[in-house]
């Protein structure tokens, strides 16, 4: 597991094994804004994420995200080879940002990390 802390944002990246492969989990704690969005981008571009069968971005610990953080998530969704899923609390300000930007139809959003991992694992088994 790799951890980084910058400007109030704490990030960790780990790999979780499933029956159908490896899922990378990126957990963020703290606000994501222009000052630290590149840190999130770096975590999503790590070898752990790039070499996995899917990526979960856990934003349960993020009380605020601006458009620069949203951009990082959207770029990752377009650039990463594996499938991507986002974990957000129902009714959270970050989920509201995703809804206002009308991206929830392009990014699968789940309420828990386990739900997201299971969904990515199911997609991987369906692809086989």
Image (cartoon, rainbow, N blue to C red):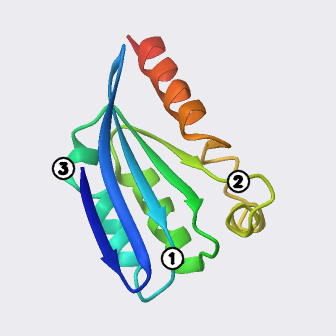
Q: Residue at x 70, y 47 (%)?
A: 105
Residue 61 in percent (x, y) is at 57, 63
Q: Are marks 3 and 2 in contact (CB under 8 Å)?
A: no
Return the mark for residue 99: none
Q: CA distance from mark 3 to mark 1?
A: 22 Å
Q: In terms of image quadrants, where is residue 76?
A: bottom left
Return the mark for residue 89: 2
Residue 79 in percent (x, y) is at 36, 53
Q: In terms of image quadrants, where is residue 36?
A: bottom left
What is the crowding at mark 2: few (fewer than 14 residues within 10 Å), some, or many (at least 20)?
Answer: some
Q: Residue furthest left?
A: 47
Q: CA distance from mark 3 to mark 2?
A: 27 Å
For the residue pair 69 and 60, the one nearer the viewer reads as: 60
For the residue pair 70 and 21, the one nearer the viewer reads as: 21
* SS assignment at label 1: loop
Q: Which residue is mark 1?
A: 32
Classify the position of the C terminus by image quarter. Answer: top left
Return the mark for residue 47: 3
* SS assignment at label 2: loop
Residue 123 in percent (x, y) is at 49, 22
Marked residue nearer the N-terminal end (1 or 2) = 1
Q: Is residue 83 left or right of residue 1?
A: right
* SS assignment at label 3: helix
Q: Residue at x 55, y 58 (%)?
A: 59
Q: Are marks 3 and 1 in contact (CB under 8 Å)?
A: no
Residue 28 in percent (x, y) is at 46, 63
What is the crowding at mark 1: few (fewer than 14 residues within 10 Å), some, or many (at least 20)?
Answer: many
Marked residue nearer the N-terminal end (3 or 2) = 3
- Residue depth check, mark 3 versus mark 2: number of the one nearer the observer: 2
Q: CA distance from mark 1 to mark 2?
A: 16 Å
């Amino acid at each position: 597991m790799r951890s980084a802390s910058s400007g109030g944002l704490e990030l960790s990246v780990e790999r979780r094994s499933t029956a159908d492969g490896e899922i990378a989990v990126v957990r963020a704690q703290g606000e994501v804004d222009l000052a630290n969005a590149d840190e999130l981008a770096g975590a999503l571009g790590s070898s752990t994420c790039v070499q996995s069968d899917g990526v979960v971005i856990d934003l349960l610990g993020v009380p605020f995200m601006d458009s620069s953080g949203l951009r990082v998530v959207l770029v990752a969704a377009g650039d990463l080879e594996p499938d991507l899923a986002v974990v957000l609390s129902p009714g959270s300000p970050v989920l509201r940002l995703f809804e206002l930007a009308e991206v929830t139809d392009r990014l699968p959003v789940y309420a828990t990390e386990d739900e997201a991992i299971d969904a990515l694992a199911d997609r991987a088994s369906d692809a086989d």
